[in-house]
Image: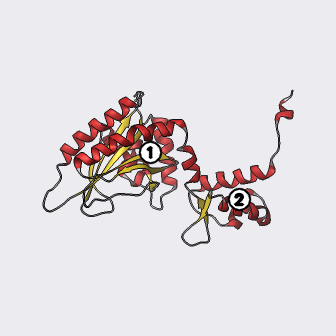
Amino acid sequence: MTDDKLNYSAPALEKGLDILELLANAGQSMGTRQIAEELGRSKNEIFRMVHVLLARGYIQRDESGEGLMLSNKLFGLGMQTARARDLVSTAAPIVERFAEEVHQAAHLVVAHRGETVIIAAASGGADMNFSLKLGYRRPLADAHSGLVLMAFQPKPVRDKMIAECLMLMREPPDPTTLAAELDAVRERGAIIHESRDIIGVTDVVCPIIAGDGRAVACVTVAAVSRRSAAPNFEAMLARLKLACAEIAHELGG
């Protein structure tokens, strides 16, 4: 049988995949007319497919209600693979135990298409803490967890992650400065730094290192400082390193 006979055509499927790939690569919301122009198709051709993708939850409207963007559904499907389930099922109990020990919220974070994504979280059992919802994401270069995830990667992977995240940022950092910062993070092995957004919260971040030396994920503590008892961040990081090493060991790292 020749290769030509193996090339089946599924126009509707191809049209839907074209839309998903375009939105993934764009890094920003797009209107139906813009999508049609980019794909070289008429607006009528795109209209039905957009509504099917909206109805099935693969795309969503942006805050203005005018633009279209990818939803978290494709990422969610990816997280259902055996490898992703193993990461969450292995790490979650350890993260939960650690959070209870330090009485702070902790988050299991991975990188996906230039962004950090929270895939598991533990509250820490305190009466007050700072916790982010599952699925929360932001550009890698704009998050301490993202800096850690990029720092512990082979150079080709790191370069690809940098390029992907810079495309998502309105005011991206200078690539040379960012690369130097990542080298410094790798040398330190972790991050303790005031939150970029919230006053009174300090991020404590440690990578989960696989056997080949790359970070498969990281754990981020959003440590709330109280007037009555200021956290010991170095002691917290020491415990966090032990937790991340335990997760890596359980994963076979």
To which residue does mark 1 refer?
110
Please state the horizontal and vertical placement of residue 21, each as a whole percent of the image.
Answer: 65, 51
In the shown orientation, is residue 64 left or right of residue 54? left
Name the one closer to the observer, 19 or 125: 125
To which residue does mark 2 refer?
38
Please state the horizontal and vertical placement of residue 125, each as a whole percent of the image.
Answer: 27, 54
Q: Quadrant of the C terminus?
A: top left
Q: In which quarter of the image is the N terminus?
A: top right
Q: In which quarter of the image is residue 42?
A: bottom right
Camera sees residue 198: yes
Name the one closer to the observer, 23 or 133: 133
Q: How far apart are marks 2 and 1 (CA)?
A: 31 Å
Neighbour class for label 1 at 10 Å: few (<14), some, many (≥20)? Answer: many
Give the amino acid at mark 2. Answer: Glu
For label 1, the SS is strand
In the shown orientation, is residue 235 left or right of residue 24? left
Taking the spot 35% from the left edge, 45% from the top edge, the residue there is 219
Neighbour class for label 2 at 10 Å: few (<14), some, many (≥20)? Answer: few
Question: Which mark sits nearer the N-terminus, 2 or 1?
Answer: 2
Q: In which quarter of the image is residue 55?
A: bottom right
- Number of callouts in the render? 2
Please state the horizontal and vertical placement of residue 238, each as a whole percent of the image.
Answer: 22, 39
Give the amino acid at mark 1. Answer: Val
Taking the spot 30% from the left edge, 63% from the top edge, the residue there is 198
Q: Residue 158 carries which label?
A: none
For label 2, the SS is helix
Taking the spot 18% from the left edge, 43% from the top edge, the residue there is 235
In the shown orientation, is residue 128 left or right of residue 211? left
Camera sees residue 183: no
